[in-house]
Amino acid sequence: MAVNGAVTWLRRAEEIDGYDLSASDSEEVHVLAVDDSLVDRKVIERLLKITSCKVTAVDSGRRALQFLGLDEEKEANGFDGLKVDLIITDYCMPGMTGYELLKKVKESSAFREIPVVIMSSENVIARIDRCLEEGAEDFIVKPVKLSDVKRIIDYMTTDFREGEERRRGINKRKLRD
Amino acid sequence: MDRNRLQHQVACMRRSLFDQGYLDEPFIQLEELQDDANPNFVQEIVTLFYSDSARLIQNIEHALNSRPIDFDKLDDYMHQFKGSSSSIGAKKVTNECTVFREYCSAENAEGCIRSFQQVKQEYAILRRKLEVYLQMVRQAAVSRTA
């Protein structure tokens, strides 16, 4: 894709409500962070940026699905060039819970491979088990610490790097110029 | 005022905020997330916390004044308030929120009303102390060494 095309596309994306895109670099891990709490969203965004991730922070499961292009009621708005490498979501959210978002992601053939991490202020074993059974990669108890984020990103990056090596030449990412 | 003196005052106030249990570990993390590229991170988060709290306090007031009281809604609001106060390390506020939620799950209106007064009080105290503290931090940052 031409550089100009990519810039125009990014600018259009920044105008859309509820989305918050940081600078792009196709080598960075791109994390989709989902939390209805404004305070927590700002904190997780900073934690992820400090860990050298690209972050898209949204305030609901619904917006997360829209970003991925999975929301049936709205058409996919051409975001599929910006691959999501990890979803980190709060559990307790109005409308769609993090658990319901997890299920929708894992039910989707296009996105089920994306690791999903759940965050919750409540350390309930049954809840943790349910999430892990549904395919969550990890479960973090809030308040989230930098060490939690580092641990997950380190694990993802190792996995990610190995995965990319396997996929090289077969499935290059669109933003790579 | 002399920079060293100001920095000393800042350090003392900071220490007492932790020693007296107003602030906890997560606040330290916020401070660690601040750097030259993000020099106002702590203030930004604290400001968000204030506006979020104002909204939630208003919602809780309204819910407590409604008849019949919707305890589920009350618990939901308080869960949010507890969440954000815990995220910034507002220890005393978070503890009062926990007490409130206990009364809430017992559907004890009296208890809720009483403990909500405590929540508001702790929040007001913390807010005052944080405003003074962060103001001092700013002053120390722009001051010169004598």
Image (spheres, rainbow, N blue to C red):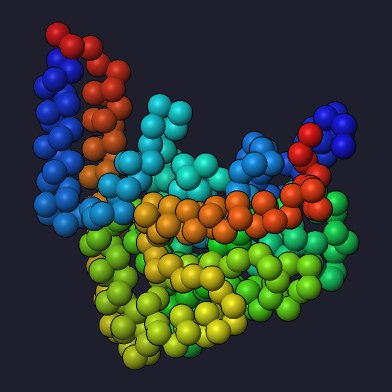
Report whether B74 appears left or right of B30: right
Q: Tell me the quarter of the image containing the N terminus of chain B.
A: top left
- Residue positioned most to the top: B146
Nearer to the camera, A104 or B16 = A104
Q: Tell me the quarter of the image containing the C terminus of chain B.
A: top left
Q: In this orientation, does residue A11 appear?
A: yes
Total labels drawn = 0
Provide residue A49's location: percent of width, then percent of height.
Answer: 51, 43
Q: Is residue B141 above or below residue A124?
A: above
Provide residue B90's location: percent of width, then percent of height.
Answer: 29, 57
Q: In this orientation, does residue A89 appear?
A: no
Report whether B14 appears left or right of A163: left
Nearer to the camera, B13 or A89 = A89
Residue at 61 percent of width and 55 percent of height: A162
Where on the picture, by quarter, is residue A167?
A: bottom right
Nearer to the camera, A163 or B81 = A163
Report whether A146 appears left or right of B90: right
Residue at 41 percent of width and 38 percent of height: B41
- Residue positioned most to the bottom: B106
Q: Is residue A144 above or below residue A20?
A: below
Provide residue A113's location: percent of width, then percent of height.
Answer: 68, 68
Report whether B78 appears left or right of A4: left
Residue at 46 percent of width and 42 percent of height: A50
Provide residue A148's location: percent of width, then percent of height.
Answer: 40, 59
Residue at 53 percent of width and 67 percent of height: A117
